[in-house]
Structures are given as C-alpha cells and as structure tokens.
Image (cartoon, rainbow, N blue to C red):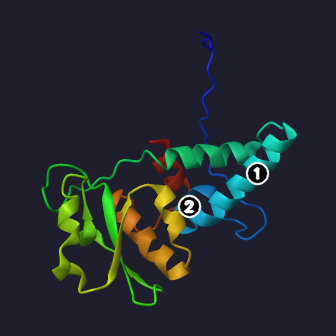
C-alpha cells in the first residue's frame, strides 16, 4: 500500500477574478452562486482538454476543481422548520405550468428526516414540484437567470451569508 508522505493542500488566499470572457471582473467564488452552470461547463471543458493531452491543471483549473469539491460539503445554518432539530438539507422548487418560473423559499426546506412533509398537496395546489439537496451541484438544473437569482437569495439565507455577498466573503465561505 502506497502512502504519500507529503500531501499538498490547496488554500487560496484571494478570489479568482476573471479578466475577460462572459464575466470580466467577477470572481469564480461569487459565480458559484449566480451562474453555477457556466462554471461547471468551463470546468468540464478544461478538465477534458487537460486529461486528453496529459497536461497538468492550471491555476483556473485548480480553483474550479477546489470550488466544485467545496460546493458539495457545505453545512446550512438554519434549522429544519418542521422538526427544529437538524439543519436543513433539502429544498423544494415549485415550477409554474410552463416550467419557466419557480417558487422557492425558506418555508419549502427540510432535513432528510422530515422530507415526507414537503409533499403535502395543500402546499403546492397541483404545481410541478421537485426536491433538491442543498449542494451547489443542484444549481445546474436551473438555467434561467430569474430562477438562479431566486436560488442565490435562498442559498444566502440558509448558509447565513450577508445580503450583499462580496468576492472576498464568497471565498471565505468556501474556505470554512
């Protein structure tokens, strides 16, 4: 069994700021909240190109890999409104009939144990609903800007983030 004597850990100090492209001047950390599908696609393309050529990961590739990993293990800060015992782990998105708009909010959240209470018919009045984990990978299912903005506000609320999320504060959130 091989064991590494020294393991290199990645600890970014400053936010990664895009100099050009679709979001010049924006940080990768804030984009995890506002346009996760864009970062995911960028990460997949960079990963595919690098692996195919046997290249080492560059600075942006390392940062995206780190963010994708960190986005999956964040712990929420608000308790489940149904049992008040465990932190929330799930949210429900209610979709309009044409699937162009969603309703989300801290009322439509729960822990895994109370998940069955999220399906009460009187809450949804025949609208299409879907339950998602509070992981950043869940954001890939919401492509339109209005939906992403609503989810951005919900994520800020459940993770205890300020209303105005700065680039540095977004980085600190992922470093926790």
- SS for tag 1? helix
Q: Residue at x 35, y 47 (%)?
A: 75
Compared across the picture, whether 112 is left or right of 5 comes to: left
Tell me the quarter of the picture where residue 164 sits.
bottom left
Closer to viewer: mark 1 or mark 2? 1
Q: Residue at x 31, y 54 (%)?
A: 89
Compared across the picture, whether 160 is left or right of 176 comes to: left
| Disc marking residue 30 | 2
Q: Is residue 115 shown to the viewer in this render?
A: yes
Disc 1 to disc 2: CB gap under 8 Å: no
Q: CA distance from mark 1 to mark 2?
A: 19 Å
- Up/down of 14 relative to 18, above or below: above
Q: Residue at x 25, y 51 (%)?
A: 87
Q: Earlier in the sequence, mark 1 or mark 2?
A: 2
Quadrant where the C terminus sits is: top left
Which residue in the rendered view is the most extreme toward the right?
53
Q: Which residue corresponds to mark 1?
A: 46
The location of residue 149, given as percent across then percent down, is 48, 76
Compared across the picture, whether 176 is left or right of 167 comes to: left
Q: Residue at x 65, y 65 (%)?
A: 38
């Amino acid at each position: 069994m091989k064991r590494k004597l020294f393991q290199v850990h990645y600890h970014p100090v400053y936010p990664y700021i895009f100099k050009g492209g679709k979001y010049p001047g924006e940080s990768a950390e804030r984009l995890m909240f506002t346009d996760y599908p864009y970062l995911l696609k960028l990460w997949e393309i960079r990963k595919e190109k690098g692996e195919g050529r046997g290249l080492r990961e560059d600075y942006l590739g390392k940062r995206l890999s780190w963010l994708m990993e960190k986005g999956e293990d964040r712990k929420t800060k608000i308790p489940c409104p149904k049992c008040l015992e465990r932190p929330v782990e799930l949210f429900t998105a209610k979709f309009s009939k044409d699937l162009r708009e969603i309703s989300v909010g801290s009322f439509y959240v729960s822990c895994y144990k109370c998940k069955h209470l999220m399906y009460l018919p009187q809450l949804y009045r025949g609208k299409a609903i879907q339950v998602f984990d509070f992981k950043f990978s869940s954001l890939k299912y919401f492509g339109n800007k209005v939906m992403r903005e609503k989810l951005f506000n919900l994520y800020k609320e459940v993770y205890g983030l300020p209303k105005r999320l700065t680039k540095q504060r977004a980085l600190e959130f992922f470093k926790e």
